[in-house]
Image: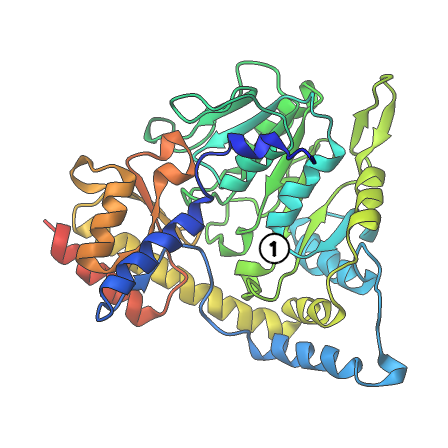
Amino acid sequence: MARINDNYLKLQAGYLFPEIGRRVKAFTDANSEAKVIRLGIGDVTRPLVPAVLKAFHEGVDDLAKGETFHGYGPEQGYSWLAEVVAEKAYKPLGVELKTSEIFISDGSKCDSANLLDIFDLGNKVAIGDPVYPVYNDTNVMVGRTGEVDKKGYYEGIVYMPCTEENNFTPELPHEKVDIIYLCSPNNPTGTAASKDELKKWVDYARANDAIIFFDAAYEAFITESDIPHSIYEVEGAKECAIEIRSFSKTAGFTGVRCGFIVVPEGLMGTTAKGEKYSFNKLWSRRTSTKFNGASYPVQKAAAAVYSDDGWVQIKEVIDYYMENARIIREGLSEAGITCYGGVNAPYIWLKTPEGMSSWDFFDKLLSECHVVGTPGSGFGPSGEGYFRLSAFGDRANVETAVSRIRAKWGK
């Protein structure tokens, strides 16, 4: 009989967001008259902007004519999209990238998981806590860890608690690690790392021959001028960092699916024999073997994100969401609830009132306010006692949700 991958059995319960969906469905089935407002999963609600939609339609129309039809595209993505990314997303930051270093994908979630394919299981991994669950769970799935302990930590992973005491900023590991996951602006806490903070990590990685997986999926939401949009703004980062970005939240592509990953050509690892080898070449080989590329119309739409009209329209949508974040953050703070984030990211990280556990607050918020959020404990043990609210909602719904919460817990 075929053997299963027993590593999957180590995973705790179900993935966080399906569990939220299960609880919400049970409540709405039993309370059909309740008008539930969903500020949980970070899914966008605003439609695609006109410039992007126009390019999307043009891409589909190209497939209807023989002279412009496109079948299989380059697995790494069309060079014209990589050129746009290099010119529009990085050059203004003072970062020069080659198109061969930019790989177009179907989203950052897949990239952050698939990256593990090109790294040996013997590498020691450091992950923040709380953090986007995919980082932790995919390392469990590939067999890098032992069993989970009573606290919720897996043997074999170095956890970096991000708490009120350290301003939700992970501290350098006390032991040598080989792979470091960093997310800035951070999901779930909404905090963002300064250039000096990122430099500490780059210096650590270079000194220890480590590689940083830098998740910059929310960089477009940064409002403060001293917060880097890319880790490559830090000198030396191309020697030690892989950067992941997404069009999902930036441009409303959660259902369209497109992102990209930057693997600098100078980024090197070692073979079992101790010889240097390029991670860029490995990722290119992996991509060519396991991926057929994002679709042509989707890549046309992605290129339009960085057009003059497209970016103005995109920015208006981002500003809309960030105004939602301000309304949530200030509204709950005025009610006496301790809040973090919501300035450089579309997430508000709040301390649960009355010392409630994260899931108890979830259930109470759902049953009494008819509002859905995300329990902080679902992002890791250090998230217990906290709760994430998303600003990706309709303005009227956001205002109503804040009003309901204030009516229940306001001081």
Q: Label 1: which residue? A: 246
Residue drawn at 57 percent across, 35 percent down: 8
- Three-letter code for the amino acid on which mark 1 is drawn: Ser
Left or right, 375 with respect to 169, comes to left
Q: How many marks?
A: 1
Q: Which x, y percent locates residue 299? A: 72, 66
Q: Position of residue 260 (x, y in %)?
A: 69, 53
Q: For residue 201, what is the image quadrant? A: top right
Query: Mark 1: few, some, or many residues within 10 Å (few <14, many ≥20)?
Result: many
- In this picture the colour scheme is rainbow
Q: Which quadrant is home to the N terminus?
A: top right
Residue at the spot 73% in from the left edge and 79% down from the top edge:
60
Q: Position of residue 193 (x, y in %)?
A: 50, 38
Q: Residue at x 77, y 53 (%)?
A: 291
In the displayed structure image, the side of residue 2 where residue 228 appears, left or right? left
Viewer-closest of 30 and 319: 30
Residue found farthest to the top: 175
Q: Residue at x 84, y 73 (%)?
A: 70
Apparent side of residue 190 relative to residue 107 in the rendered image (left or right)? left
Residue 380 can be seen, yes or no: yes
- Residue 351 visible in this rendered orientation of the protein: no
Check the image and report above or below for 249 versus 396: above
Indicate the quadrant where residue 188 lies: top left
Nearer to me, 329 or 188:
188
Q: Residue furthest front?
A: 1
